[in-house]
């Protein structure tokens, strides 16, 4: 079923006489529905608005793409800018959002074992068990999985590029009947029929109207996709199986890498597929999908109506958007009202600060870190220098070969700053044939560099990290023998090439190695805070494994995702915050199974306040710089699902609390039953499990409330402690909280004060970090703090 011989489609964009006549898709958003109306009445109501700006009723009907009816009140339609402007002026319209495919994109095993969730072997498999405290962690993990019934009864909706239903990860063998609460459908289409849904994949839908309006009528060949819920490129299957995939033994990538049992976090949870992301047409060599806001909002609206418990979104904006213009934020708020937990990826634009997406406080925003599995190969230079490298390529060298630097064998005319990058058609075959080429990261795709080396006749590639990449080594399925190395090693190789008349190199094949230390580390690509939409909310919330993750793949795409690659893989190793997000979504499913009455905010709080701040060497988790990572990289820390089941205290927040928070950022009039008060509280007073205060110039009092959920410990006393950010003091009033029943709430205030004796220590505008915690005999409830001085 692999798509072949796809013909590129050329788009001709006509020059219109007047931009006021140029139609495009807009989302018109009204907030919550007013009163009880039948679905057809809601659509008729939406069409009446279109009719008010269109010349005819037929024009109004034909322009409508989606009428959002279940929870979200709004519609998507093809409008001129003038028509959109008229609708935006109406009092009942909260926002009019111009759709554009460049705004959203997808953010692209051992990982569950790494966080302590390993299933117990029951069929005689020989497994080498860890010892001591790690052994205890696995015992706790198995107890946790049993308590959560492996997620049975929980429905996880995955908003992505679809699913490859034939994968063993989506088998329904041994699963019980579909939950009675389920209201969804199995939508059929090209290469996808009702038999592809089962007791595991209980629902599947696709949303293409926005995509077709932008790219034209769908064509399987030109669009390189299936007009159905089927996944054409692996991204959706990978994320879905990471969250809720069944346990599959003997899974590996590229013939043996990461060999073991692949499993999602909640393997007995049910999967609902919402395909709203599509292959980028006519860009065969470009990785990624395109996701239109109007399609995604329709998917979220249906997911809410279908009855999912969790929504996993490995999609985000390339540039952060205000909440009123962000389709994911809008949809997620409506989901949270119905106690559906929404997790979303932070993005892959790090380590530059202020780049993270999905920053709304009602979304659990997930960064990406590493696990303790690496794919170790080796590089040997002719001078005897030997270094361990990383590689998952199946190609091998059988002897030493001459070594060259890409910049020295580039064709004339290549821009000076690109000569080292091994970009397409940049290398001279007569200077590369039979040699190993040192290529540097920076511009172009990593796999594309190996393709260029192969095109020019090279037998191997050394892929060198730039300083921005640090020591983070993604593993890719390259087309030549490849060794990926750190910046320090790059310097040694360059020095060898410069000083030796006949430099040579040999690349050893990679093997899978576990318990590599230190782990976890923060990845360089994971998008960073501060939250540029509202710096009063600290983001990301948490981090989870996102580097070199093994999970299910699509049979319609190669492991490299490149058009020229004809290999097919059942499982593949992939990297991105797209991979870390479903780890947290799987953990949420388990927590929902154990605590079905917990709110979305309570689950977020439990995950955040119990997260790891230290690595497996019991030292602070490091950033790519080698220094301790700060909360703008890792949020509260690396997720620890087993601890989150019993957090002690939680910071809860209701739907109305989010509406009140919206007043502080101009996101208002969403619900007809709620009006902003005359005195609007500052955004930092939302009851959140972290604190962020930008431009501190006086003493600020932050209000918080905690709820006792302590796992049978109805009577408990918690004591406050803090490590204040540099230049300020952090104190709590009261500093002792006593509880005598489960569900009891206690309010407290935190006073953040500038220390006059430290005012000159920290630069104005530069963030400093710390934490505070509440501790009893059994729990440490920790929250990060970020402060900048005015």
Image (cartoon, grey):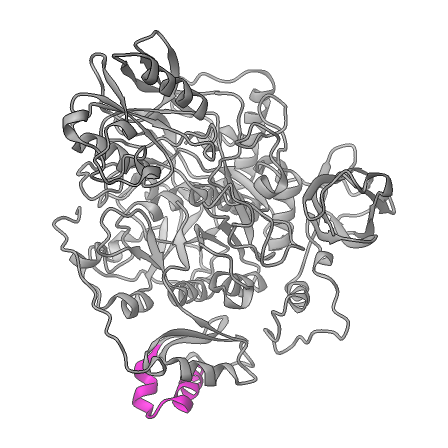
> In this view of the protein, which residue sits in the foreground, 755 or 296?
755
Quick check: 20 above or below 217? below
Quick check: 340 above or below 86? above
In the displayed structure image, the side of residue 721 where residue 383 appears, left or right? left
In the displayed structure image, the side of residue 473 where residue 766 appears, left or right? right
Residue 738, image x and y in percent? 85, 44
The answer to if 48 sits in the magenta stretch is: yes
Residue at the extreme bottom: 56
The answer to if 611 sits in the magenta stretch is: no
Residue at horizontal 59 percent and vertical 16 percent from the top: 132
Span colored in magenta: 40-64
Q: Report the predominant secondary structure element of the magenta stretch.
A: helix
Residue at horizontal 75 percent and vertical 65 percent from the top: 681
Quick check: 215 above or below 762? below
Residue 91, image x and y in percent? 57, 84
Residue 124, image x and y in percent? 38, 20
> In this view of the protein, which residue sits in the foreground, 664 or 48?
664
Query: Which quarter of the picture shows residue 341?
Result: bottom right
In the displayed structure image, the side of residue 487 where residue 777 appears, left or right? right
Work out whether residue 527 can be spotted.
yes
Work out whether residue 738 can be spotted.
no
């Amino acid at each position: 079923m692999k798509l072949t011989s796809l013909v590129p489609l050329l788009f001709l964009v006509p020059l219109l006489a007047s931009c006021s006549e140029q139609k495009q898709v807009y989302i018109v958003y009204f907030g919550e529905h007013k009163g009880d109306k039948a679905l057809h009445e809601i659509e008729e109501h939406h069409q009446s608005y279109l009719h008010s700006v269109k010349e005819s009723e037929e024009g109004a009907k034909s322009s409508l793409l989606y009428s959002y009816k279940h929870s979200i009140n709004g519609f998507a339609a093809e409008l001129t800018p003038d028509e959109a402007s008229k609708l935006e002026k109406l009092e009942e319209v909260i926002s009019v959002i111009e759709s554009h495919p460049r705004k959203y994109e997808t953010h692209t095993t051992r990982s569950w074992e790494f966080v302590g969730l390993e299933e117990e072997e029951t069929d005689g498999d020989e497994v080498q068990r860890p010892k001591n405290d790690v052994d205890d962690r696995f015992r706790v993990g198995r107890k946790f999985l049993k308590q959560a019934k492996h997620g049975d009864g929980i429905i996880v909706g995955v908003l992505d590029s679809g699913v490859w239903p034939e994968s063993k990860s989506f088998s329904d063998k041994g699963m019980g009947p579909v939950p009675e609460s389920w209201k969804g459908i199995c939508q059929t289409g090209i290469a996808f029929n009702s038999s592809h849904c089962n007791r595991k994949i209980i629902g599947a839908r696709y949303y293409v109207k926005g995509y077709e309006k932008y790219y034209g009528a769908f064509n399987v060949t030109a669009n390189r996709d299936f007009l159905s819920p089927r996944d054409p490129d692996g991204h959706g299957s990978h994320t879905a199986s990471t969250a809720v995939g069944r346990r599959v033994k003997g899974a590996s990538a590229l013939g043996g890498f990461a060999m073991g049992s692949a499993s999602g976090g909640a393997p007995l949870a049910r999967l609902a597929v919402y395909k709203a992301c599509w292959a980028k047409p006519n860009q065969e060599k470009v990785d990624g999908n395109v996701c239109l806001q109007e399609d995604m909002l329709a998917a979220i609206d249906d997911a809410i109506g279908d009855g999912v418990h969790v929504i996993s979104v490995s999609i985000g904006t390339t540039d952060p958007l205000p909440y009123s213009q962000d389709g994911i934020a809008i949809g997620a708020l409506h989901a949270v009202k119905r106690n559906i937990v929404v997790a979303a990826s932070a993005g892959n634009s790090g380590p530059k600060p202020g780049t993270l997406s999905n920053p709304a406080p009602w979304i659990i925003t997930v960064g990406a870190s590493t696990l303790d599995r690496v794919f170790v190969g080796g590089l040997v230079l002719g001078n005897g220098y030997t270094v361990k490298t990383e590689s998952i390529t199946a190609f091998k060298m059988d002897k030493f070969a001459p070594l060259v630097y890409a910049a020295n064998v580039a064709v004339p005319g290549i821009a000076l700053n690109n000569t080292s990058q091994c970009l397409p058609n940049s290398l001279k075959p007569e200077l590369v044939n039979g040699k190993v080429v040192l290529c540097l990261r920076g511009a172009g795709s990593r796999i594309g560099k190996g393709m260029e080396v192969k095109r020019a006749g090279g037998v191997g590639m050394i892929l060198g990290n730039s300083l921005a990449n640090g020591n983070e080594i993604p593993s890719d399925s390259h087309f030549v023998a490849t060794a990926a190395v750190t910046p320090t090693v790059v310097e040694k190789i360059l020095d060898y090439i410069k000083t030796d008349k006949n430099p040579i190199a040999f690349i050893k094949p990679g093997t899978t190695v576990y318990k590599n230390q230190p782990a976890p580390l923060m990845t360089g690509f994971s998008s960073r805070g501060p939250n540029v939409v509202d710096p009063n909310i600290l983001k990301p919330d948490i981090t989870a494994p996102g580097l070199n993750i093994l999970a299910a793949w699509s049979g319609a795409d190669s492991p490299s995702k490149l058009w020229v690659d004809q290999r097919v893989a059942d499982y593949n190793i992939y990297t991105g915050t797209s991979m870390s997000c479903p780890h947290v979504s799987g953990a949420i499913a388990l927590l929902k199974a154990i605590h079905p009455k917990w709110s979305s905010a309570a689950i977020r709080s439990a995950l955040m306040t119990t997260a790891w701040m230290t690595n497996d060497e019991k030292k602070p988790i490091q950033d790519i710089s080698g220094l301790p990572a700060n909360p703008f990289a890792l949020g509260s820390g690396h997720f620890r699902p087993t601890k989150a089941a019993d957090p002690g205290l939680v910071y809860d927040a209701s739907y109305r609390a989010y509406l009140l928070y919206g007043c502080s950022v101009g996101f208002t009039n969403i619900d007809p039953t709620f009006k902003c008060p005359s005195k609007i509280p500052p955004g930092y007073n939302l009851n959140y499990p972290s604190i962020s205060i930008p431009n501190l110039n006086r003493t600020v009092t932050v209000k918080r409330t905690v709820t006792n959920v302590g796992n049978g410990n109805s009577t408990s006393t918690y004591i406050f402690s803090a490590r204040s950010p540099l230049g300020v003091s952090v104190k709590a009033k009261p500093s002792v909280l006593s509880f005598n029943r489960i569900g009891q709430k206690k309010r407290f205030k935190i006073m953040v004060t500038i220390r006059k004796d430290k005012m000159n220590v920290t630069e104005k505008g530069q963030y400093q970090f710390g934490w505070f915690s509440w501790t009893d005999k059994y729990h440490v409830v920790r929250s990060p703090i970020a402060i900048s001085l005015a």
